[in-house]
Amino acid sequence: MTSRPSPASQGTATLNVLGNEHRNMLERAVRNVLRTEVAELVYAQILDGLPTEKSLRDSSDFVKDHPVHSLHHADICPGYVDKAREFRNQFDLSQLPLEKTIQAFADTVPGSEVFNLRLIEIVAVACRQIGAFLFNLDDGAHKHKVYDDWRQSVLEEKERGVESRRYYDPPPIAFCHRAYRYPEQYPQGMADVAGYWAESKILGGVVVFDRGETEQEVWPFDSLK
């Protein structure tokens, strides 16, 4: 596998503000998620460059000429599950830009409800940030250009009044959650769209936090279905 740039290039996060108990529990929680089969397969798809047909059906309407279907992309291309495993084995939590959530977690008491909430929050953000980083590599069997060119042709047909495209609004990228498809709203643009897709696939939904008065409420916003 060729060497890859470190996710630290996206922003430097420090875990030095965490005590040993906080840090150990956080690193264990993130690694436990990354070791799951679903996380492995989700990140392998992003590395590959296209979701599988089954994965696409779970998160998008069927469009016959979508690249995933026209290429009969039923399975992850050979080698990309191994690449996802290699990334996982080399992963260091300090590589992710988690500054906004680390300090809030550091201020909690281990075992408290707020501690557990903040822990869930950082795990969700980590899942998202990893997905965004891997998307930005664009080093898969299927480059982003494959989907981008198809999407542009769909938009041109829609502009010309092609009836089959009249009500279809193609997602900005191939990895897209129905509710998180507006790259202009996110700091990392298209990469964050992929990140939300990854988070939802891995955790069963995009995790939303209602700070409210108690700061102790959290739930999955929506599954992909």
Image: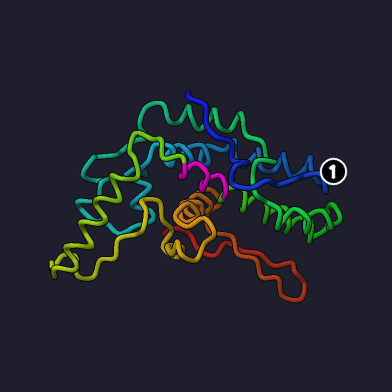
List x then y, in percent, for residue 56.
Answer: 35, 50
83 left or right, relative to 31: left
Residue 94 belongs to magenta span = no
Q: Quadrant of residue 34?
A: top right
Q: Is 21 situated above or below 189?
A: above
List the single residue furthest toward the top. 1
List the single residue furthest toward the bottom. 213
* Residue lying at 23% horizontally and 62% vertically, measured from the top left: 155
Q: How is the image coloured?
A: rainbow
* Residue lying at 70% horizontally and 70% vertically, measured from the top left: 211
Residue 134 belongs to magenta span = yes
| Mark 1 residue crowding within 10 angstroms, few (<14) / some (14–19) / many (20+) | few
List x then y, in percent, for residue 201.
Answer: 49, 50
102 left or right, relative to 87: right
Badge 1 element: helix
Between 130 and 30, the one nearer to me in the picture: 130
Q: Which residues are magenta?
A: 129-136
List x then y, in percent, for residue 25.
Answer: 77, 43
* Residue lying at 40% horizontally and 51% vertically, measured from the top left: 175
92 left or right, relative to 67: right
The disc labelled 1 sits on which kind of residue? Answer: Glu
Between 74 and 188, the one nearer to me in the picture: 188
Quadrant where the C terminus is found in the figure: bottom left
- Numbered marks: total: 1
List x then y, in percent, for residue 88.
Answer: 58, 33
* Residue lying at 79% horizontally and 60% vertically, measured from the top left: 113
Q: Which residue is mark 1?
A: 21
